[in-house]
Amino acid sequence: MLHRHLLRQAPRALQNSSLASARLASNPLRQCQPAVSAFSTSPRRLEDQPHKGEVGDHVGSFSRTDNQIQVEYPAEEKMPRSKPVQGRGGFHFKRTLASFSLEGNVGLVTGGARGLGLVMSQALVVSGADVAIVDLNKEEAERQADLLVKSFKDENPGAEQVPKVTAHYADVADPESVNQAIAEVIRDHGKIDNLVTSAGFTENFDAIAYPYDRVKKLWGVNVDGTYLFAIGVAKHLMERKVPGSMVMIGSMSGSIVNVPQPQAPYNAAKAAVRHLCASLAVEWAHANIRVNTISPGYMLTALTKKILDDNPELAQKWTSLIPQGKMGRPEDLMGAVTFLLSDASAYMTGADLRVDGGYTLT
């Protein structure tokens, strides 16, 4: 068909060319204008043609990583401390569904001694659950466990039941350490009903310059740690023949590429967590074990504030890409984690709940 179409067009093109020559001969002014050939052996490619707004140093600049940005996760002794959120518990008169309650449940939270993990541990406490905080820094976990209990008592004077909060050590990337921590929690609490895998960290290195031993450590904590605790708690729930609910903390970075800071291994790790959640949700649906993820956007944790103090230009770039125009607060995750762990989300499994101010929508 294309061949026949070109044959039909050829006589017409020759005729047009003859007419053009005749016009040029009769009108010398036309000879000053460029002639347009009916056929061109080297047509200008569409991608080579300039478009409006295409010229300048700004082109693509807001959607690229900057290999000059380098942020290394701090050593344990240099980690900033987090504080329990004030005024989030206590008596109130706003009505809500009883299905959001976690009373009678025992929740295990990895990375629960600081940052997002601490806030979600507090969410479980104010929702009525007993909580086991598992962290690499057991001393800090013990300190925060005491603070959470104290905060609950201060906000609930005369409460008949005070949640039990315990602290436990675990290297989440080590199977033996994980199994020992799970056994210790079961010994102290008698059972585990809910799991929140919040242990994780990010670093910013140009992929080519990223020390591979640190890449392996990052994947070990973010991916292996999530997997090991999930299968350990799932075994416990299956042995008890009871339902359970897990929340894996992913990130919007599992769905998009953050800019301008380079962080390819972290992005890949969080994408792995999101798909691990979906896979385990299907695998364990028969046992009535639900698995969902929360994917936070940029959150103003104590560590993030420290990073922004050292790199103030990042705050402006990040917020310029967030439709709500602001970074999230750790307490913005309290309702999300309570919802996904409780019976209020009984028909949800394998879902990814993004809490990112709309970042991933644009």
Image (cartoon, rainbow, N blue to C red):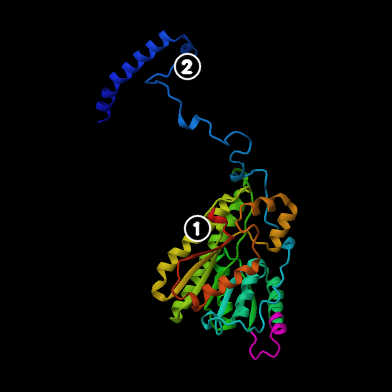
Bin the neighbour count of mark 2 within 10 Å (Cα to Cα): few under 14, some 14-19, many 20 and up: few
Pick the residue in front: 237 or 60.
60
Residue reaching furthest front?
Answer: 26
Q: Residue 98: x and y, percent?
A: 53, 83
First in sequence: mark 2 or mark 1?
A: 2
Residue pictured at 55% horizontal, 77% vertical: 183
Q: Secondary structure at mark 2?
A: loop
Q: Nearer the viewer, mark 2 or mark 1?
A: 2
Q: Which residue is mark 1?
A: 272
Within the image, what quadrant is residue 126 found in? bottom right
* Residue at (73, 67) in percent of width and height: 81
Which residue: 37% across, 20% down? 38
Front residue of 33 and 314: 33
Q: Is residue 268 left or right of residue 26?
A: right
User: Residue 39's x, y, as percent?
Assistant: 37, 21
Disc 2 to disc 1, C-alpha distance:
58 Å
The residue lying toward the viewer, choosing from 274 and 216, is 274
Is residue 222 or residue 59 the one in the foreground? 59
The residue tagged with tag 1: helix, strand or loop? helix
Left or right for 279, reference 248: left
Residue 316, visible in the rendered structure: yes
- Determine the residue positioned at 42% across, 11% down: 24
Q: Height in image: 174 above or below 70?
A: below
Q: Is residue 198 part of the magenta span, yes or no?
A: no
Picture quarter with the N terminus? top left
Which residue carries the number 2 mark?
34
- Residue type, numbered disc 1: Ala
Where does the magenta region start and end? 151-162
Tag 2: amino acid: Pro
